[in-house]
Image (spheres, rainbow, N blue to C red):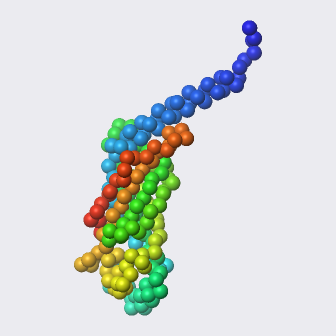
Amino acid sequence: MSGKFNFYGVFTGFFMVIAVISGCRQLGEMKNLSKCQFRLKNIQIQSVDNVDVSNVKTMNDLNVTTIAKLGSSLLTGKLPLTFQTNIESKNPNNQNAAINKFDLHILFNNVDLVQTVVNQRVEILPGQTIVIPVVLTSDIAQIVKGENIRTVLGWIFPGNDTPAVFTIKIKPSILVGPVTLSYPGFITLSKDFKTQ
């Protein structure tokens, strides 16, 4: 019988135990995630065609020169919109919940605007409510093709008779070891949410 210490065996066994514990913890986080509540807190329009509109409350706050510039951009077929979606999540569990990434689909007036994957780990403590901010840019020119710029601006700023309707869909995922486990189907946060 050898008296040598099997360092490699102990080292490997130790990390196998850690991996199992870690996997169990992550599975628990996924289970807790399934009980979390999500809602769209708001959408903040930051810029239109690189024009800062973060402080604009209604279309009436825009001057004639800015509206003319945006109208010209729309006619050329390019009107990039930068906005921040603030997704609120509440963890009603007595243990942590977590997300490693999530698929995000956004529709503007029921037309696809953005489809992306947000690689951002988020942990939600027991009883905690957090806001997950996601800043995105998308060209809306093709979506609003045929409309005049005043109609478009009336959609994307609040305080108007016909503001835009944003539909937000998310599919959270969590890593368990090398495996990605995704939420079954998309969660639709709001079908009737209007910009704020």
Q: Is residue 26 above or below residue 173?
A: above
Residue placed farthest to the left in the image? 161
- x and y percentages locating residue 135 in the rendered image: 46, 65
* Residue 53 in view here: no
Q: Residue 25 at what x, y percent from top left? A: 46, 35
Is residue 178 positioned above or below 158 on the image? Answer: above
Relative placement, left or right, of 120 versus 12 is left
Instruction: Work out which residue is located at the far top of the displayed protein and give it.
Output: 1
Quadrant in which the N terminus is drawn? top right
| Residue 134 pos. (x, y %) | 45, 61
Observer-nearest of 9 and 134: 9
Residue 182 in sight: yes
Among the 4 quarters of the image, the one containing residue 47 = bottom left
Which image quadrant for residue 33?
Answer: top left
Circle count: 0
> Which residue is painted at 40% across and 47% down in the image?
183
Residue ID at (47%, 33%):
24
Residue at 47%, 81% in the rendered image: 78
Image location (x, y in percent) of residue 49: 47, 80
Q: Is residue 115 above or below residue 140?
A: above
Q: Residue at x 46, y 71 (%)?
A: 138
Q: Quadrant of the C terminus?
A: bottom left
